[in-house]
Amino acid sequence: MATVRGCHMVGSVPLADTETVFRTCISGMPNRLKRIPDGETGPRNYFVYFQSLLWPKAIQPEIELNVLPKARDFSEEEYVEGLRLLEATELKTGYDDAAIASYEVFRRLKKDGVLPRDMRFLVCMTTLGNVVGAYVERAFQPRAEKMYEAALFQALRNIQDRIPPGELAIQLDMSVEMLYWEGKWAEPWWSDRSYMVDYLSRMANQVDKDVEFGLHFCYGDMEHKHVAEPESLQGVADFANSILDKCGRPASFLHCPVALSAIDRLDDYFRPLETLVPRLRRDGTELYLGLVHAGDMECTRRMVEAASKVAPEFGVATECGWGRTPADHLESIMEISTAVSEPFPEYTSKETSGA
């Protein structure tokens, strides 16, 4: 059996505010978190939906949950007007403002001994595909991409200028990109997957070298349903290797989902990790598998056992963030996560636990 050590929180948590998230999760998963997010509470609780508010309505597609958007045809006059509205838009993502405000709570709770002094604050950042690919009509995506990338890079710079690097971890959330990679989303604004690898690598390299950098792969989580069910982790393994090859820096951690739909074919589902795990071990990258399913300890244990055949060491997580999870499921998630994992040894002493 593999060494199963530690837990990872992907991002969102259905609680009232940042301090409640910190206090609830550090006590619910004692000595098992190296990093903790602010829970993306308030207007950020539905992943990147709040980013849809940045764009002019005239260039946005009709959104229907778990349905691929269809590109509209625009007349020349509509296109010119849409482009004018887009060019006049001042894009400020808000990720920096939220992170800087939440860090102040994080810093205070560290000072008070609630959080371990070596813990990092995890900032989860969207990528181009999640927003431009979902909330901008195909005709305007090439221009929107450049504008939004600049806004994301500025937010990253602001975050890193205000939060000490030794206390910061930045995670890139790739949901629509994962669907693009496997050809399960609408036609993108680029023609070759290498284009996507290039822009993700550019973003990864905006993270300073002394700040932790991680990757989160996902297949969407709308109404507790994937946009597309993964057949295996082949896509994740191939995509992750491509990004890491291109960006030329190791990741501190990597998270990928383990779908409930894979329960009867777990060996096949996990086998592609054989092409990724050696790299992660060489680079010291922590692997977190999203195999914790609320209310189902047996399922989780079966997944842990199967994953152990290809990964000698990993931590656990849920498939995606908890934002749309019923609040009464949180206790089960934290109990299962704790039960199937070991604590980090550096946090087990009373001196450093913050408990």
Image (cartoon, grey):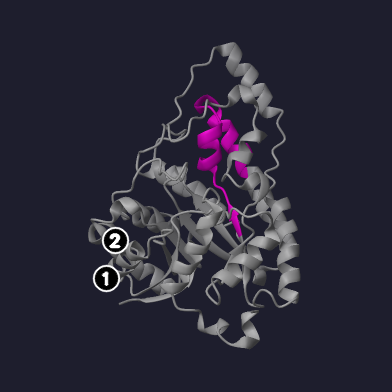
Residue sitting at x 29%, y 65%: 274
* Amino acid tagged 2: Phe
Provide the residue designation for mark 1: 309
* Amino acid tagged 1: Lys
Residue sitting at x 55%, y 39%: 131
- Please identify the dominant SS of the magenta region: helix
Residue 130 is inside the magenta segment: yes
Q: Is residue 323 above or below residue 21?
A: above
Front in this rendered view, residue 92 or 218: 218
Would residue 83 appear left or right of 67 to someone viewing this image?
Answer: right
Quick check: marks 2 and 1 in contact, CB under 8 Å? yes
**Where does residue 233 sit, x and y in percent of width and height?**
32, 55
Q: Is residue 128 above or below residue 73?
A: below
Q: Is residue 209 visible?
A: no
**Where does residue 85 sit, x and y in percent of width and height?**
68, 24
Q: Residues within 10 Å of mark 2 (few under 14, many from 20)?
A: many
Callout 1 secondary element = loop
Residue extending farthest to the front is 328
Which comes sooner in the sequence, label 2 or label 1? 2
Provide the residue designation for mark 2: 270
Residue range of the region highlighted in magenta in the rendering: 123-149
